Image (cartoon, rainbow, N blue to C red):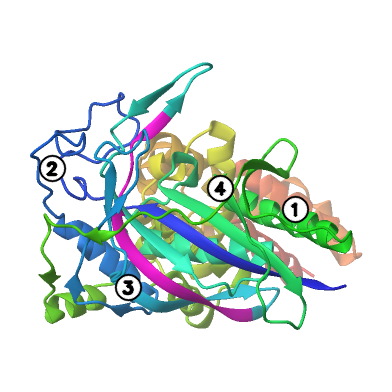
Amino acid sequence: MEYEAVIGLEVHCELKTKSKMFSAAPVSFGEPYNTQTNAIDLGFTGTMPCLNKKGVEFAIRVCHALHMTIDEVLWFDRKNYYYSDLPKGFQITQDRRPIGRDGYIDIEVDGKTKRIEIERLHMEEDTAKQVHYSNFTLLDYNRAGIPLIEIVTRPTLRSGKEAAAYLEKLRSIFLYTEVSDAKLEEGSMRCDVNISLREKGTTAFGTKTEIKNLNSISNVQKALDFEFHRQAEILENGGKVMQETRRFNEATKETVLMRVKGDAVDYKYYTEPNILPIRLDHQWIEDIKNSLPEFADEREKRYIQTYALPEADAKQLVATKTLSDYYETALKTSQEYKLIANWLLVEVPAYLSKHGETFESMKMQPDQLAKMVTLVSQGTISGKQAKKVFEEMMNTGKDPDVIVEEKGMKQLSDPAAIKAMIEDVLMANPGLVDDYRNGKSRAVGFIVGQVMKASKGQANPALTNQLVVEVLKAKM
């Protein structure tokens, strides 16, 4: 029997506001445990929440990017449950009236475009973080109250590859809208997946399994691929798939049972009594939409159509907003589109990997890279010299003009001066003209080498080669 997967994703994204969703405590990562909290985060009796306007703005940015219908009246609800990481005994969230509904993302898989339908986007507060030790668990409340958005797809995904493409696209949107750093390894973007199987061609849903604690996009794809084969094998053998919560074991590349799920938990949602419904100004929502930046897809198309970059280069450049912004800034100084892209996609990653550095921390500024590329295209320095200038810029952050001057690298491109050196070589080696006349083309290479030696490597190689041929032909 041939099966197809029915997959839905729930993605949580922490928003990088300066303060938390309902308190003035700071939002940060990596600080000592329980140092970024206040009485509201800890659920002290008598404390009152105060809504973070910037958090609402960030949620609206993403809603616009996902083509969603935005509810212009904000309603918040209480999700009631008792767990160690929930200090108040409830979570402030949105239940019946999420801020965004009915959106979509178009993804590309195997050269085909597919639309992934998104059911809802709602705002809520994050819980505390559990820090597990060998025989006990402690709680870090730094995370409690950090603004979250949760994005839930409809079950329109059919494979692990589609899920990975969707998550890459969603992460790109988070980065380009500048609402989050979307680092799965730090937990600022988290993903739970649901997967069930059904016979291909049918419409009924099978029994779904939930997979939690996936800390990378590649692991999402691997977990879904494994789970597809696991469930298919159960069904082929006449078994029944159980409704379970599973986790992905990175070492074995398999999903592992965490717990068997029973009936859905009744969270007893009701409207948050301490936050009255808030009507949003329609013009404010439109202003947020109009202030959105150019997204990765649009930039990629422009790089291909306007800058004539290969599609692979364009895709690499827009993969992260930081890299794409760097490229955009460099182009303000030089329009050598392809040359600048080559340095950014080849030489820069090689240097960073070799020296264990990050793109964000490198010393070379966009205008400096652009100036260096211009020096090469103008023939002021050679490609070989450019690599030395590049290393110095990456090491020190110096301007390329300063480096060229300090190291005496300026390329000699004066035809008269180069011809004079060629004549000196021929005077010292009179047989070279006869060699060239007799078809010994290596004479040209010898003369070019001697000129480069005489000029201490500063003669323009291409121009020198051209002038050597001209001088020799004139003497035939």
Amino acid type of the residue tagged 3 in the rendering: Gly
Q: Which residues are magenta?
A: 113-130
The image quadrant where one finds the N terminus is bottom right
Residue that mark 2 sits on? 24
Amino acid type of the residue tagged 2 in the rendering: Ala
Q: Main secondary structure of the magenta part?
A: strand
Residue at image x 65%, y 49%? 451
Residue that mark 3 sits on? 100
Q: Earlier in the sequence, mark 1 or mark 3?
A: 3
Q: Earlier in the sequence, mark 1 or mark 2?
A: 2
Q: Earlier in the sequence, mark 2 or mark 4?
A: 2
Q: Earlier in the sequence, mark 3 or mark 2?
A: 2
Q: Earlier in the sequence, mark 4 or mark 1?
A: 4
Residue nearest the observer in this picture, 406 or 290: 290
Residue 153 appears left or right of 399? right
Residue 415 visible, this orientation = no
Are there few (<14), some (14-19), or many (20+) residues within 10 Å of tag 1?
some
Q: Is residue 445 above or below residue 145?
A: below
Residue that mark 4 sits on? 212
Mark 1–mark 3 Cα distance, whole angstroms, equals 32 Å
